[in-house]
Amino acid sequence: MIPTSLDWCQKQDSTDPLREIRDRFDLPGGVIYMDGNSLGPSPRGVAERLAHVVAEEWRTDLIKSWNTADWINLPSRVGAQIAPLIGAGPDEVIMADSTSVNIFKAAAAACRMNPGRTEILSEPGNFPTDLYMLQGLADFLGPEYHLRTVERTEIKDAISDKTAVVLLTHVHYVTADMFDMADITEAAHAKGALMVWDLSHSTGAVPVDLGRANADFAVGCGYKYLNGGPGAPAFIYVARRHLETARQPLSGWFGHQSPFDFKDEFEPASDIRRMLVGTTSVLAASAFESALKAFEGVDMRVVRQKSLALTDLFIALVRERLSEFNLGIVTPEKHSNRGSHVSLSFAEGYAVMQALIDRGVIGDFRAPNYMRFGFTPLYLGFEDVYRAVEILEDILRTDAWKDSRYKAKSSVT
Ligand SMILES: *Cc1c(COP(=O)(O)O)cnc(C)c1O
């Protein structure tokens, strides 16, 4: 039995080894933020850093800042900051583009490294952009290529000598169901396929060890658990053993071995920079670089322990207090299969979530009927979880969610 009393929650908060990390964030008052899996909040210092970049590096120093402020190396610097969070070497990760674009680049590079194999494998219900980008890639590569989607329990058996690349999202964006990364990667390699992991819902929330899992490629999101800011650049990982052979088709000048030689012929950089395309979005990258300081000295094993304790508490409270409302808990109970968010299915989930947001409990809604709650151990406490369920209970018990103003859907859910 998991203790669920307010007393217990307060005691957990007072002995929480991460409690001081909360001060690294600039959260508004009156809010229990449970959507850090969709848009991380602003870490302290980011606004000031951004103001400095605009006022000094851009306004005053103008174009000199590419050298004097080392803008040119922002992608590598941010990549190196992310590396320890995903079990990668600093030379294996680079900040670039969006996750969608990086999916294309990684999967295309993998297909090229595996000629003669024409199947791209993923799972139905993967995050839409992952499937859309893979569909686009298969179409682009030609009629012999196709995207095949297979239920997650059958993936390992479905990998064959036709499979060029398997692309999966480590933690599922709705259910938080988490793959065994090493196990699936091994199965892919056993059949000669290459493996791309999408870490969008993992990085900064659960420990990831790409090196130990022997992954080939990975991509991930900057604006979720990494708190890089709205629309922050993403990252891409290439295993060191592939750095000389991986070629991605968006061969822009930032991926060139020596961009400022202005040669006509493309020659890929000899290192991870070959995954770059064009000019870095310096303001966004600067915000991201500053935001990543929130992870300094943070042990991901401690984060994981607290994340599991928070999701355990939430699930236990939902069971204990809300059983009569027929909420479906779609997130796995088993710790080894659970990421860092919990989704509840409820037919009127959209309206309930709007009522929650109105009362300061910010989660989100995913079609067709999932209320999603993110648990970010760096700033969410046990009492926060207790209060969130208390408010959810009140909304359900009083039918507050039936108010017509909670029904109208905004364009972003
Ligand atoms: C959030 C997310 C993305 C986001 O892609 P963008 O290109 O940043 O819009 C991609 N894949 C997964 C699995 C995600 O969770």
Image: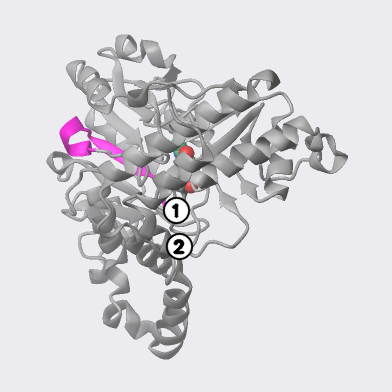
Q: Residue furthest front?
A: 7
**Does label 1 or label 2 sit earlier along the sequence?**
2
Q: Are the residues flagged by discs 1 and 2 in contact, CB closer than 8 Å?
A: yes
Which residue position is annotated with label 2?
Answer: 25
Instruction: Tell which of 140 and 27 is nearer to you.
Output: 27
Residue labelled with disc 1: 379
Of 19 and 73, the residue lying toward us: 19
Q: Position of residue 195 (x, y in %)?
A: 27, 29
Tell which of 94 and 174 is nearer to you: 174
In the picture, measured across the screen, residue 273 lies left or right of residue 55, that is left
Quadrant into which the N terminus falls? top left
Q: Is residue 114 magenta?
A: no
Instruction: Identify the residue at horizontal 48%, vertical 59% (top origin).
Output: 229
| Quarter occupied by residue 319 | top right
Across and down, in percent, residue 50 comes to 45, 74
Give me the residue at 22% from left, 52% from top.
272
| Residue farthest toward the bottom in the current orientation of the protein | 60
x 60%, y 42%: residue: 388
Residue type of the residue flagged with mark 1:
Tyr
Seen in the picture, residue 266 relative to 129 is either above or below; the reply is below
Residue 102 numbered tag: none
Above-or-below relation of 119 to 411: above
Q: Note whether residue 20 is visible.
A: yes
Residue 211 within the magenta-colored segment of the rendering: yes
Residue, far left: 241
Count the marks: 2
